[in-house]
Image (cartoon, grey):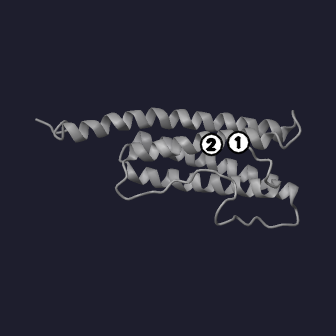
């Protein structure tokens, strides 16, 4: 992801916004499923995104101590957004979240390049990129499982009925 045309402040605010939106998304997805294990995984992802947001807010405060954090309504940085539609299949939402996690991973690799190699900040941003890839894998497994479930529900409506 090419971030050369953006100021550091814009990038940090976009990252904070993205992490907050991801956290909210994962909490909303927990409401769309009755699967307790999936709910736990989504809550875990939401808490991870919240930790990233808090770290990024500290970075912002360190670089711009005289400014308040003002999250933009729309981000100038091309990061994906996910629209929750009432009747959208959970597998589709998980797929959209997967795309967002990969974009976040690419974003953190590019953002890390804005800081001196080997510094704590540089390495932490690369670590965030790795974590986003891990989030992608969690979502990928759950999406594939959900697709099997949704397919069974569509093609064999009584598959879950007892004797």
The image position of residue 116, as x and y in percent, is: 89, 38
Lateral position of residue 2 relative to residue 61, left or right: left
- Residue 134: give its label: none
User: Which sits in the foreground, 66 or 6?
Assistant: 6
Q: Residue at x 68, y 39 (%)?
A: 106
CA distance separating discs 2 and 1: 8 Å
User: Which sits in the foreground, 114 or 161?
Assistant: 114
Lateral position of residue 17 relative to residue 68, left or right: left
Q: Residue at x 62, y 56 (%)?
A: 20
- Residue 1: give its label: 1
What kind of element bears circle 2?
Answer: helix
Lateral position of residue 27 relative to residue 75, left or right: left
User: Which sits in the foreground, 93 or 55?
Assistant: 93
**Quadrant of the rendering where the C terminus is positioned:** top left
Where 69 falls versus 105 (above or below)? below
What kind of element bears circle 1?
Answer: loop
Lateral position of residue 23 relative to residue 115, left or right: left
Where 96 falls versus 162 (above or below)? below
Nearest to N terminus: mark 2 or mark 1: 1
**Quadrant of the rendering where the N terminus is positioned:** top right
Report how many numbered discs are placed on residues in the image.
Answer: 2
User: Which sits in the foreground, 84 or 51?
Assistant: 84
Q: Residue at x 65, y 36 (%)?
A: 131
In terms of image quadrants, where is residue 57?
bottom right
The image position of residue 17, as x and y in percent, is: 66, 57
Q: In this figure, which residue is indicated by the disc labeled 2?
A: 103
Q: Which label sits in the foreground, 2 or 1?
A: 1
The image position of residue 135, as x and y in percent, is: 57, 37
């Amino acid at each position: 992801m090419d971030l050369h045309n953006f100021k550091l402040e814009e990038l940090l605010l976009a990252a904070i916004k993205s992490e907050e939106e991801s956290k909210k998304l994962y909490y909303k997805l927990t409401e769309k499923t009755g699967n307790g294990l999936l709910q736990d995984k989504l809550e875990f992802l939401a808490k991870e995104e919240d930790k990233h947001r808090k770290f990024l807010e500290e970075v912002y405060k360190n670089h711009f101590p005289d400014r308040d954090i003002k999250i933009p309504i729309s981000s100038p940085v091309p990061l994906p957004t996910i629209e929750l539609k009432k009747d959208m299949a959970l597998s589709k939402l998980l797929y959209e979240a997967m795309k967002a996690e990969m974009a976040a991973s690419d974003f953190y690799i590019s953002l890390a390049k804005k800081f001196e190699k080997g510094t704590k900040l540089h390495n932490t941003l690369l670590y965030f990129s790795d974590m986003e890839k891990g989030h992608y894998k969690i979502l990928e497994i759950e999406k594939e499982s959900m697709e099997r479930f949704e397919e069974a529900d569509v093609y064999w409506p009584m598959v879950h009925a007892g004797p």
